[in-house]
Amino acid sequence: MQSSYTRRNEDDPGRFDEIKRFYDCRYLSACEAAWRIFGFDIRYRTPAVERLQYHLPDEQPIVFHDDDWVDEVVENTSLGVSQFLNWMGCNNSTVEEMQVAKELLYCEFPNKFVWKKKLRQWSLRKKGFTIGKLVHVPPQCGELYFMRVMLNHVKGPKCFEDIRTVNHFVHPTFREACYALGLIGDDREYIAAINEAADWGSGFYLRNLFATLLFCGTLSMPSKVWDETWQLLSNDILRRQHTLLNNQDLQLTDEELQNYALIDIENSLQINGSSLRRFEGMSFPDMSATTHHRNSLVMDALLYDRQSLSEKHEIQLSSMTDEQRLVYNEVMEAALNNKGGVFFVYGYGGTGKTFLWRALCACFRSKGDIVVAVASSGIATTLIPGGVTAHSRFGISINVTEDSICSRIKP
């Protein structure tokens, strides 16, 4: 932190005002500090740096003033000619003086040529010297980023296909061209990490790990990592579906296993504001293939081990007192016969009310039914499996007024 100037207190000129001094300071990063330490020039530097624009096919920018007539903009064909397109046109030229263009990278082009904005074309430089610099593009931009990487290694391309050509083979994407040229990693370390984590981690953990790698932009070829590890990422899907559907004979194809795994990965990415659609080559799941993934509340309510709950229910049922058994039978009769009803159980602390609620929850959940367990206090919710407060589950206003409604209860 370096202060640009020090301001004194207006009431006492001989005393520094630390607060004003703090606000007046400015931050110099490491590169700027080093530039000043070595005494390099800060202003009036030559040669100038020309920032070179580039774009994907059919995505060239068109710049015009807001007061220009629409017809004139449409008829002006030169507006669609960018620096980048005209550079490839120079590489295709048969003029003798333009042959030097084929020996230059795009970033080296301003060394020998000048961009004339009015004519919208490159002309051979007669004097001076300029440095060219490609505009920065983050990896999250996908194909545009990988094309920028290729432009630092390909000389004299005449079209976009030439940029994607490696060893006389035209790759379908710039990403694959970078991969073939060895400019990006093969993600072997991440595949090995997933294989190692599979020895002790569940499929749910591995899917979250894969989603994290995608979200952080770590993987160079996400589709290749997915192709080699999808069996590990979906190793618990079949068992989960057996539990959810209470059908131990259920069989799923490889496509269905992949779809279920991709749904979980997509849900993890959406929580972080991303999606599988942003990653080149990654398949997008069929979200309508399963109904319980459409509603996160329903999905959470069904994620219980029915077998263990059934065994626990038998133990709880045999341990009930006569009074608990009486309440249990009334609730079960109303539920099984679709009678409905409201039941209020009164008793002092320690008389077994929570035990009764846990037994009822275990009974219904072991049959694959949905139980919404709510309580008025946070402490009470911790005593019931899957319990939450009523205010949280139903969106009940804490400050109750005449207009207060449960926003999550729909008629």
Image (spheres, rainbow, N blue to C red):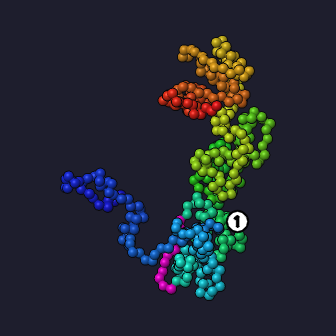
Instruction: Identify the residue shown where x is 67% and y is 37%.
Output: 299
Can residue 261 be seen at all in this image of the molecule? no
Q: Pick the quarter of the image with the C terminus.
A: top right
Can residue 194 be seen at all in this image of the molecule? yes
Q: Which residues are magenta?
A: 126-136
Q: Is residue 267 above or below residue 356?
A: below
Q: Pick the quarter of the image with the N terminus.
A: bottom left
Instruction: Identify the residue shown where x is 75% and y is 46%.
Output: 256
Q: Nearer the viewer, residue 387 or 344?
A: 344
Q: Is residue 308 above or below residue 7?
A: above
Instruction: Identify the residue shown where x is 52% and y is 83%.
Output: 125
Q: Nearer the viewer, residue 81 or 303?
A: 81
Instruction: State the residue position of label 1.
Output: 172
Q: Residue furthest bottom?
A: 96
Residue 49 coordinates in the image, percent (x, y): 48, 73
Instruction: Identify the residue shown where x is 41% and y is 62%.
Output: 30
Residue 365, quarter of the rendered image: top right
Residue 343 coordinates in the image, percent (x, y): 63, 18
Residue 117 coordinates in the image, percent (x, y): 53, 76
Prevailing SS of the magenta stretch: loop
| Amino acid at pointer 1 | Pro
